[in-house]
Image: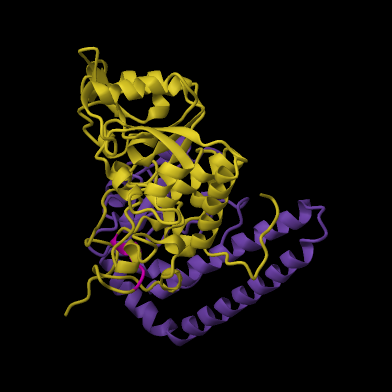
Chain colours: A purple, B yellow
């Protein structure tokens, strides 16, 4: 399970890389760097292809057992079943993905604090993101902030104009007020 | 400095810092550049940075402080004491000097929480000293976590109301060398660069790019474990220490390649997580330093 989450994280990074390269290609007028970027695009799409095949194989091999298993898990209220099947990363201009559309109250969100084996989730502007394996959230903490909480104001004050950070995070659901 | 140094010249960090400092020494000896005065002021700190500097190599600390600069004042290293020592500090004001500052400025009770000596029978506070010396310095180096952003001295609940020196010298330009302590190369290399070429290129937080440009995570020898999701569960595990609370992913220094104690090892090389000591906001923003109750799924034995 953890490996599949990691693969999704890698896919997200690779897609961000492709988007960045396409943007660079469309804006640069230095012909000298174009071959380098094209080579990297080629390599990155190869990696995406490889990981895609890997995930399809895994999904085919364990589709049946996992669907049985996920029913048991969902009773226990853990979100592991949301990690399969793999999702295509969302590009920045798309709205909140429909997959993984779980609703959280603030109280429920507090359970996902990254302690005792739970995943680490945080909410920004009504969307709940998974930061379990995000590199800036070691031990489910980030510059004194603990996971399992709502951080719209904190995000706005420290990462103004950096919405792109959010698009790289896996979305697990929405936060709603009771 | 824009010219690339091509192989076969050694491009290791030690080689580059040695070239820089040897060059500075040669130019001083040939009279091409003037030996400058240096005042090393210690305010509200623990003397950790000066102890770290004693570990300097290429050049060693003594050679740097006698051959590269005239050291006018350092409370830890000078022979004079009491008012005689402070008299040397006051004499420094007469000429041109580079000011290196270690330790934070304690603001509470008008600076009375940090007395660095006495002058004309009155206690001299760190606050007075930094204002006096900071105004006239040709260059200012903020050395270590406390001087750059308050660091440990300003950690909660901050009883002395300590702040970084940039909060007191608001209109002065300074070079920030965060770290708890600072690596001897970061200080000596910056000093040599100042003598040779003037101020080094810095980032938007005034840290020299030659030492602080790279995320530890991006040069970490254990990065492949992170990318594959293989995480250490306890200290001494040889895999990625991310789940235990490693701050390498948010800290910019060259520790993975430069290493410490004469370039022999560094925290992650000794299986303990980076605590982000060179990140602004350390230590509060980097806590907890270690965490065992984590997102990993605990397996039954």
Q: Nearer the viewer, residue B92 or A31?
A: B92
Q: Nearer the viewer, residue A110 or B208?
A: B208
Q: Nearer the viewer, residue B53 or A143?
A: B53
User: Magenta stretch containing residue B241, yes or no?
Assistant: yes
- Percent of width and height locating residue A116: 22, 62
* Horizontal side of residue B120 vs B22, given as left or right: left
Q: Nearer the viewer, residue B147 or B291?
A: B147
Q: Is residue B75 above or below residue A123?
A: above
| Number of numbered discs | 0
Residue B56 appears in view:
yes
- Percent of width and height locating residue A161: 56, 39
> In percent of the image, x 69 and y 60: which residue is there?
A21
Image quadrant for the C terminus of chain B?
Answer: bottom left
> In percent of the image, x 41 and y 23: which residue is there?
B92
Q: Is residue B80 above or below residue A144?
A: above
> In percent of the image, x 51 and y 78: which residue is there?
A55
User: Magenta stretch containing residue A151, yes or no?
Assistant: no
* Quarter assignment of residue B223: bottom left
* Horizontal side of residue B211 vs B268, given as left or right: right
* Quarter assignment of residue B83: top left
> In percent of the image, x 39 and y 46: which residue is there?
B279
* Horizontal side of residue A3 vs A89, given as left or right: left
Among all residues in the image, which is located at the extreme left?
B301
- Percent of width and height locating residue A68: 35, 79
Among all residues in the image, which is located at the extreme bottom?
A61
- Percent of width and height locating residue A162: 55, 44
* Quarter assignment of residue A67: bottom left
Residue A126 appears in view:
no
Give the residues in magenta.
B239-244
């Amino acid at each position: 399970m953890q490996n599949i989450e990691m693969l999704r994280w890698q896919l997200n990074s690779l897609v961000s890389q492709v988007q960045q390269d396409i943007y660079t290609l469309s804006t640069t007028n230095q012909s000298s760097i174009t071959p380098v970027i094209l080579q990297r695009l080629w390599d990155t799409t190869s990696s995406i292809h490889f990981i895609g095949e890997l995930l399809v194989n895994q999904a085919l091999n364990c589709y049946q057992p996992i669907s049985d298993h996920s029913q048991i898990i969902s009773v226990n209220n853990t979100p592991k079943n949301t990690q399969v099947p793999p999702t295509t990363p969302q590009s920045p201009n798309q709205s909140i993905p429909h997959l993984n559309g779980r609703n959280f109250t603030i109280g429920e969100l507090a359970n996902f604090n990254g302690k005792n084996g739970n995943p680490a989730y945080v909410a920004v502007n009504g969307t709940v993101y998974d930061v379990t394996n995000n590199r800036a959230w070691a031990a489910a903490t980030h510059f004194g902030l603990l996971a399992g909480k709502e951080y719209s104001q904190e995000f706005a004050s420290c990462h103004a104009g950096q919405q792109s950070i959010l698009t790289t995070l896996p979305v697990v659901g929405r936060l709603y007020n009771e | 400095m824009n010219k690339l140094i091509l192989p076969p010249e050694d491009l290791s960090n030690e080689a580059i810092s040695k070239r820089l400092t040897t060059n500075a020494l040669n130019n001083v000896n040939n009279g091409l550049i003037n030996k400058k005065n240096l005042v090393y002021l210690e305010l509200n700190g623990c003397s950790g940075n000066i102890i770290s500097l004693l570990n300097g190599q290429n050049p060693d600390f003594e050679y740097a402080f006698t051959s590269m600069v005239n050291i006018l004042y350092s409370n830890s290293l000078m022979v004079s004491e009491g008012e005689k020592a402070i008299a040397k500090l006051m004499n420094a004001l007469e000429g041109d000097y580079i000011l290196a500052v270690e330790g934070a400025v304690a603001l509470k009770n008008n600076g009375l929480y940090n007395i660095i000596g006495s002058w004309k029978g009155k206690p001299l506070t760190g606050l007075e000293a930094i204002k006096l010396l900071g105004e006239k310095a040709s260059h200012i180096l903020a050395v270590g976590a406390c001087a750059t952003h308050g660091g440990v001295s300003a950690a909660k609940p901050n009883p002395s109301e300590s702040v970084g020196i940039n909060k007191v010298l608001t209109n002065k330009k300074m070079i920030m060398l965060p770290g708890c302590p600072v690596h001897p190369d970061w200080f000596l290399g910056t000093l040599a660069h100042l003598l040779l070429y003037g101020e080094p290129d810095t980032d938007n937080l005034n840290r020299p790019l030659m030492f602080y440009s790279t995320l530890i995570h991006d040069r970490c020898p254990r990065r492949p474990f992170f990318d594959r999701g293989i995480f250490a569960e306890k200290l001494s595990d040889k895999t990625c220490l991310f789940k235990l609370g490693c701050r390498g992913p948010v800290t910019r220094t060259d520790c993975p390649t430069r290493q410490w104690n004469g370039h022999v090892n560094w925290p992650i090389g000794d299986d303990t997580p980076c605590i982000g000591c060179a990140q602004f906001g350390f230590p509060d923003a980097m806590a907890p330093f270690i965490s065992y109750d984590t997102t990993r799924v605990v397996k039954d034995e």
